């Protein structure tokens, strides 16, 4: 393993801690702030590993997080933001095979679309009002990102999604379940 790849993996592991911590937040804003830091670091991680779609989606995700942290000021719950980000994700997907010259195979079409699904699910969850919704949509986002991360061998991202799934479930049990 080259030094660049080792550094990329370390950055991914640090990013993992931010993302995992986000699912234990009681507030929507706290969860998004933690995810913002993780997203910035995963942008660097994926870029260094040559997983350009992952880096691009995370970069867009960082911009999205800043907007949704300022939800009231920017009226980020407006459907226009969701539609706008969805269009940006889809355009980025198309650019992957045109401008970025990703080989247009059936496997690549599917594999590169997985982060798009994850980003759309997370963007929708940010429009909602509580951390419980973020955890529910994490059950969509995490598995698709996990497959992408395995294919691109981002160790921190793989561990992150496995632990994120566990963290989401723990958060749901600890914070969302009503005591009877």
Image: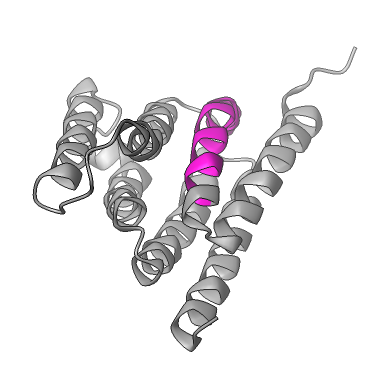
Where 60 falls versus 176 (above or below)? below
User: Is 53 part of what is drawn in magenta?
Assistant: no
Q: Position of residue 118 (x, y in %)?
A: 43, 34
Q: Position of residue 138 (x, y in %)?
A: 55, 33
Residue 24 in view, yes or no: no
Q: Position of residue 178 (x, y in %)?
A: 80, 17
Residue appearing at x 53%, y 60% in the figure: 154
Q: Nearer the viewer, residue 59 or 51?
A: 51
Left or right: residue 114 versus residue 170 is left
Q: Quadrant of the C terminus?
A: top right
Where 50 falls versus 11 (above or below)? above
Residue appearing at x 15%, y 52% in the figure: 101
Q: Quadrant of the N terminus?
A: bottom right
Residue 174 in view, yes or no: yes
Residue appearing at x 33%, y 34% in the figure: 113
Where 161 falls versus 34 (above or below)? above
Left or right: residue 49 versus residue 14 is left
Left or right: residue 124 versus residue 136 is left
Q: State which quadrant residue 76 falls in.
A: top left
Please tell me whether the stretch drawn in magenta is mainly helix, strand or loop: helix
Q: Nearer the viewer, residue 93 or 79?
A: 93
Q: Nearer the viewer, residue 101 or 85?
A: 101
Q: How is the model colour-coded?
A: one colour
Q: Residue furthest left?
A: 99
Q: Residue furthest right?
A: 180
Q: Position of residue 21 (x, y in %)?
A: 64, 54
Region of the chain picked out in magenta, as a range:
131-149
Q: Residue furthest top?
A: 180
């Amino acid at each position: 393993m080259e030094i660049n790849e080792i550094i990329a993996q370390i950055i991914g592991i640090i990013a993992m801690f931010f993302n995992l911590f986000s699912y234990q937040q009681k507030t929507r804003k706290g969860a998004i702030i933690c995810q913002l830091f993780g997203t910035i670091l995963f942008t660097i991680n994926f870029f260094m590993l040559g997983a350009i779609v992952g880096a691009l989606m995370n970069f867009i995700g960082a911009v999205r997080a800043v907007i949704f942290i300022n939800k009231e000021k920017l009226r980020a719950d407006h459907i226009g933001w969701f539609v706008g980000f969805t269009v940006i994700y889809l355009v980025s997907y198309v650019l992957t095979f045109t401008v970025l010259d990703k080989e247009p195979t059936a496997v690549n079409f599917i594999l590169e679309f997985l982060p798009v699904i994850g980003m759309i699910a997370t963007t929708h969850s940010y429009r909602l009002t509580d951390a419980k919704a973020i955890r529910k949509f994490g059950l969509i986002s995490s598995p698709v990102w996990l497959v992408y991360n395995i294919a691109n061998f981002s160790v921190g991202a793989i561990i992150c999604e496995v632990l994120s799934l566990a963290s989401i479930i723990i958060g749901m049990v600890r914070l969302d379940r009503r005591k009877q």
